[in-house]
Amino acid sequence: MFVYNIAVRFYFLIIRLVAGFNPKAKLWVDGRKGIMVKIENAIDQSKKHVWVHCASLGEFEQGRPVIEKLRDYYPDHRIVLTFFSPSGYEIRKDYKGADFVFYLPEDTRHNAERFLKIIRPAFAIFVKYEYWLNFINQLEKAGIPLYVISANFREDQLFFRWYGGFYRDILHKVSYFFVQNKTSESLLNGIGINKVMISGDTRFDRVAGINADRKEIPLLSQFKQNDRIFIAGSTWEADEKLIIGYINANKNEHLKFIIAPHEINEENILELVASIQENVVRYSKTTETEVMNAKVLVIDNIGMLSNLYQYGTIAYIGGGFGKGIHNILEAAAVGLPILFGENHQKFNEAREMVKLGAAIIINQDNLAAIVDDLLNDGMKLHKLANIAKTYVNDNQGATDKILDKIKVIHH
């Protein structure tokens, strides 16, 4: 514990040191200034609360179906939502599905004690991961149940290594795990944790909800017209280099491209636009007339991607040449064949969709051949689209399984 606290304090110190020249670190630091006073002033301690914690935006989207259904299951409880990362908090700080949205205070014993004394949650829900030991220790000490939802474990994680005893001890403090698959259940059982349910992944419920509630985007209809659309979502530099090479070499006059980069800073957008040799426009700086004549549309804002896929024919999901792919389920939910790079093994849904044939792994050399093959074979394109859509539909229901079980445990 002593070593953990030293390591955590050193980690927070590093963030403060880089905050002077790193905008994200600055948001992280500034957002936590006076955080305890802010929480204390906001919370009515006479009310009942449920605490939900998400690391960042992706985990929030994963936990969102559960957060929104908590209202039905616990109508007299107020929901306190915390984020560790600015990329989650800054985008969702005004989210109306929670009563309060805060940055998670730094993980010290004092902060954890004070935070829990203020909100006094009936129980806590952590989405997927993030095992902050002081908060978990204080939850256990106070007798407050902690549920981890949509958890996904792999054999190569520290918890399951011979030297991972400290990390295993943290897992043993969790009241109940709701895991995505059998592998995760077996790994937890193997270290003596049996309070586990295979509930599936709540992201399937989330993307199904997005799909049912998707909104028309008039400018996208003008862009699409009667053509086919290749959508590249959450792309990084390696993805963009590959895609731009294909765009610049492509002569199919009935194929258009939408690129929604992960990094939307002005420098990256300008560089991206300059490297495309076709008629390219930016979403925020185009008109209906200009977009109708464009071959490539670059999305230069955040929050549109899930609504873009309805206009697509094929989806390319970025990240597969870096740390790992981004969300493939939003595209699958509307019935698009999915393409991504080789670094996808950490994602259960990616492995399963490859096995089913709805997703195809691409490399530096085969993108053009794979896309052209799909576009030239209408039956194959239609078949893959149906497999993708069916896969999402068949895997819904995790939210109700989780909340039904919590209701039984926490009666």
Image (cartoon, rainbow, N blue to C red):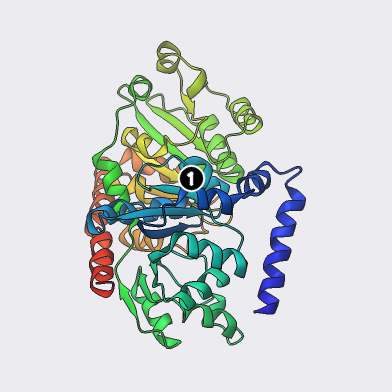
Depth order, front residue of 77/356: 77
Q: In which quarter of the image is residue 24?
A: top right
Quarter containing the N terminus:
bottom right
In this picture, residue 386 sits left or right of residue 305: left
The amino acid type of the residue labelled 1 equals: Leu
Number of residue marks: 1
In this picture, residue 126 sits left or right of residue 28: left
Q: In which quarter of the image is residue 293?
A: top left
Residue drawn at (57%, 71%) of the image: 134
Residue drawn at (52%, 78%) of the image: 170
Quarter containing the C terminus:
bottom left
Q: Would residue 335 be seen by someone viewing this image from the given angle?
A: no
Residue 228 lies, in percent from the top left, at 34, 31
Residue drawn at (48%, 65%) of the image: 129
Q: Around disc 1, counting alpha carbons within 10 Å, would you say few (fewer than 14), some (14 to 19), or many (20 or more)?
A: many
In this picture, residue 221 sits left or right of residue 37: left
Residue 268 lies, in percent from the top left, at 63, 33
Residue 12 lies, in percent from the top left, at 69, 59
Q: Name the residue under label 1.
A: 367
Depth order, front residue of 66/208: 66
Residue 215 lies, in percent from the top left, at 30, 31
Depth order, front residue of 101/199: 101
Q: Quadrant of residue 222?
A: top left
Q: Would residue 291 be seen by someone viewing this image from the given angle?
A: yes
Q: Is the residue 333 above or below the residue 175 in the image?
A: above
Q: Is the residue 325 above or below the residue 277 in the image?
A: below
Helix, strand or loop under label 1? helix
